[in-house]
Image (cartoon, rainbow, N blue to C red):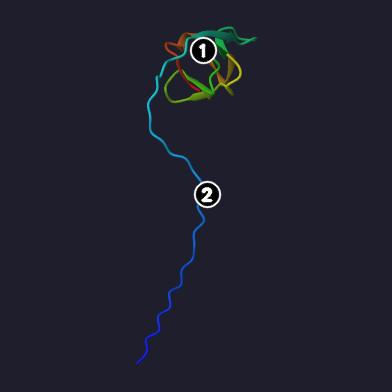
Amino acid sequence: MATVTYAFANTNTVNPSKAGDGDGAVSGYTVDVSYTLDATDPDEVSAVVLDFDTAPGTAKITFDDTTWTDCGADGTATQLTCTLASNVTVLSITTITVVAAD
């Protein structure tokens, strides 16, 4: 009596990757905020200008923690203009949240 066994196997190709674990200091940015008033209605803000101490890789702002505006950061500019999708009245601004990362 003879037993014949076949096993078929295929290979997977896995690209090289990196993984790591470590720690490092996390510090914040110093940022000055100024507002650009709408040219036709100075009761409204049309843009926010952010002046950072170091150029961020990404930056966004919000007045209500719901609607976020991307400020077009790319890691090269310390001054960013965040053009609002729709104007915000000056009186409605009670807080601004700036989120930035490198």
Disc 1: CA contacts within 10 A as few (<14), some (14-19) or many (>=20): some
Question: Which comes sooner in the sequence, label 2 or label 1?
Answer: 2
Proximity of marks 2 and 1: CB atoms separated by less than 8 Å: no
- Give how far apart the Cα atoms at labels 2 and 1 are: 52 Å
Residue with the most extreme right position: 39
Q: Which residue is drawn at 47% across and 40% down?
A: 18
Give the residue type that dot 1 points to.
Thr
**70 is higher (above) or lower (below) than 20:** above
Residue 89 is marked as 1
Residue 54 location, x and y as percent? Answer: 53, 14
Residue receiving disc 2: 15
Quadrant holding the N terminus:
bottom left
2 to 48, vertically: above or below: below
Residue 11, percent across and down? 49, 62
Relative to residue 14, is residue 39 depicted above or below?
A: above
Q: Which residue is drawn at 61% across and 19% down?
A: 76
Examine the image and state in which quarter residue 45 appears. top right
Towards the viewer: 80 or 89: 80
